[in-house]
Image: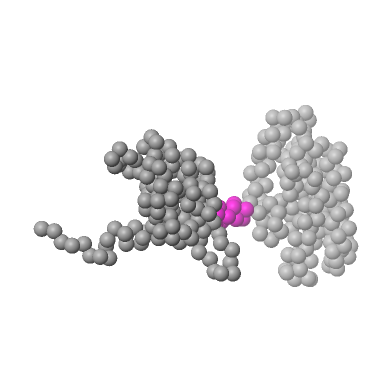
Amino acid sequence: MSSAVPEQFCLTNILNAVSLGLIVVDSDEQILLWNEWIAKSSDIPEQQALQKKIAEVFKEAPNPAFLSALRNSLNYGLPAVLSNALHRSPLPLYATADADQEKQRIHQSIAITPLPENQGKRCCLIQISDSSNSIKREKMLRSHSEILKRDATTDSLTGIYNRRFFDEHYKMALGLSIRQKLPLSIFMVDIDFFKEYNDYYGHPEGDKALISVAQTLKAQLARATDVLARYGGEEFILILPNMPQEHAEPFAERLRAAIWDSNIPHLKSKIASQLSISIGVSTYDQIQQNDVKLLIQSADSALYQAKQLGRNRVAFFAPDKINS
């Protein structure tokens, strides 16, 4: 016993209801099926497309890779897939747009499937899906991932690297210096009397001062391998590979002078009426030193020494003097 299929479920309605393009071509590449999705996306009505060769029906020629894949499927009965990663828009299909907007070409994923032969002739079903939204989602996810990665290694206030990044980078830079037998210099920087600055000017102005100091220090770096990071509240740390002591101390003096020349007022400083920094420097040199664990500790000792000597100055402390 059979029952009539309701009209709304007829094959034509189903083919036109799906949200992807469907094209069937015969062995001569002539179009046998052209559903509504492809008609709207190509702006070519079904009656204009049927019985025309697919290479000639569009207003612009299809991508050669698409035609090659289709012909391989027709000749050898092999299915083919044109992924969006390699073939972004093989066919000239466009998203519907307002009259005052420029049409955007659809990003496409295309599957070509050989159909069973009919009277010795092979046909192919071409399925085209709009992958524009998935690409947008992928870009958003990639952008979000990059933001998270940047946030994990960047100080949110100053925009320079944070302590976490420095700790990881320091291990790699030190290992490289050891392997290549090159010197490595560390600079510990502290803003003089910054608590007094915050108490007098307020924390918003204190934040501005931190940003200014960070950007001024960063501007002194010339090599991609040079790293500046915020180490603590008002402390910064720099690591400069392949910089021996005889170059490190003049460079530290240049850092100090750059902040001094910025002329940031600091009326509550106990040494001047403008903002200043103290810097502790230490250099690892494999020829002279063996205990590399003491490098940051010796830079911190040098910073303490600079403060004891009156601040707004540079002091150097060698790692081998820590335990002596």
Q: Nearer the viewer, residue 159 or 57?
A: 57
Q: Image point 49% across, 49% down: which residue?
A: 56
Whether residue 145 is in magenta: the answer is yes
Q: Which residues are magenta?
A: 137-151
Q: Residue 276 versus residue 55: which sits nearer the camera?
A: 55
Which image quadrant for residue 80?
A: top left
Which of the image's four quarters has the C terminus?
A: top right
**Taking 164 as reference, is 122 left or right?**
left
Who is closer to the viewer here, 225 or 90?
90
Query: Of residues 259 and 313, which is closer to you in this image?
Result: 259
- How many marks on residues? 0
The quarter holding residue 194 reads bottom right
Farthest residue toward the left?
A: 1
Give percent across and percent down for residue 8. Answer: 27, 65
Q: Which percent across, then down, holds residue 225?
A: 73, 42
Please tell me which residue is depicted at 43% across the width and 57% down the height of the picture: 48
Q: Is 272 left, or right, of 204 in this rendering?
A: right
Q: Is residue 164 visible?
A: yes
Query: Residue sitting at 60 percent across and 55 percent down?
Result: 147
The residue at the point 56 percent across, 69 percent down is 99
- Is most of the magenta stretch helix, strand or loop? helix
What colour scheme was applied to this rendering of the protein?
one colour
323 displayed left or right of 256? left
Q: Is residue 324 visible?
A: no
Q: Up-down: is 145 above or below 283?
A: below
Q: Position of residue 195 (x, y in %)?
A: 76, 64
Q: Indicate whether residue 318 is drawn in magenta.
A: no
Q: Is residue 319 left or right of residue 42?
A: right
Q: Is residue 83 above or below residue 212?
A: above
